[in-house]
Amino acid sequence: MLLAQEPVLLAHFGSSVVLMATHTQHGHGDVLDLDAELLAEQLASITEWLPVRSTPRRIIDLGAGTGAGTFALLDRFPDAQVVAVDSSPEHLRRLREKAGTDSRVETVQADLDADWPGLGTADLVWASASLHHLADPDRALRQIRGLLATDGLLAVVELAGPPRFLPDDAPADRPGLEARLHAIADRRINAHLPHRGADWGAKLIAGDYTVEAERTLAINNDAPPAELTGRYAQLILSKLGHAVAEELSAEDRKALGHLLESLPHRTDLVVRTDRTVWAAR
Ligand SMILES: C[S@@+](CC[C@H](N)C(=O)[O-])C[C@H]1O[C@@H](n2cnc3c(N)ncnc32)[C@H](O)[C@@H]1O
């Protein structure tokens, strides 16, 4: 579902004044929803691939966000109940709004860095792009062991970093701008999220799991409507630009202003990202 324009603020890049996605949970919720919409096919292929031994009846989605995994899993396993856990009330509000009266979906607001609430047991625990946000993912993996029913499966989905969109020679006035933005942002994000890009296979083995399968999807998606990709690129690049603005050269700041304005109209954008999934018992 493509959401309406959410909160933006005006920011100055060089001489340009551009719309910037805010860093509120609203802005982040938009990114998660667009991500789910643009990568729906890849997500479906991951849920299809999961080496479950029997059809899961109860699923726990840890760090569920606005429900990308919750609803993809319900498409795959329509008879299951899903408990969607997240620390963000705003994400869970969006998720509940999408669920409507669907009694298969339950939400639990909880900080997984603190004491875990009683979540019961599950045949499938799903943690997509969430474990790297936690202060101590190894502790989380230990907690998850206590949630898994006999023969239960843990699916960890992780990614190397935010998606990229532009050809290398774009934008015309400052080629390579996107790569420069990512290089600065990566340094900063790595300082805040040291577990992003971790070797989750090794972590799982260290946590006494058996990794049954691992799969990486390199996504190079030029199929979605250009307007949708443009809006997604605008959200991602404006967030990155906002985060690293003072480290950008004046020329890059100016070029970013022009680029952000042009993104909804560009037809050369391709969503390039990756997802790796580990299935463990
Ligand atoms: C990148 S999003 C992924 C959301 C969703 N799994 C998806 O694939 O779209 C990470 C999610 O983890 C949640 N999160 C981060 N730290 C958390 C914590 N300590 N406890 C619970 N949830 C947390 C965030 O609120 C966010 O919804």
Image (tube, grey):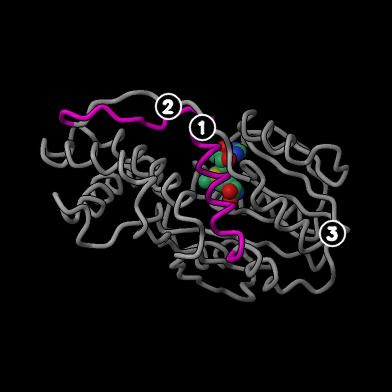
Asked if marks 2 and 1 touch (Cβ < 8 Å), the reply is yes
Say which amino acid is labelled 2: Val
Task: Classify the position of ligand 1 by quadrant: top left, top right, bottom left or bottom right.
Answer: top right
Which quadrant is home to the N terminus?
top right
Q: Residue at x 23, y 26 (%)?
A: 12
Q: Residue at x 61, y 42 (%)?
A: 65
Point out the stretch of residues depicted in magenta. 14-42
Disc with the residue nearer the chain's start (3 vs 1)? 1
- Residue at numbered disc 1: 5
Q: In x, y percent, where is residue 31?
A: 50, 42
> Which is in the foreground here, disc 2 or disc 1?
1
- Residue at numbered disc 2: 8
Compared with 35, 222 (above or below) is below
- Residue at numbered disc 3: 78
User: Regarding mark 3 in the picture, which secondary structure is present there?
Assistant: loop
Disc 3 crowd rating (10 Å Cα; few below 14, some 14-19, many 20+) is: some
User: Regarding mark 2 in the picture, which secondary structure is present there?
Assistant: strand
Real-space Cα separation, disc 3 to disc 1, in angstroms: 31 Å
Compared with 20, 185 (above or below) is below
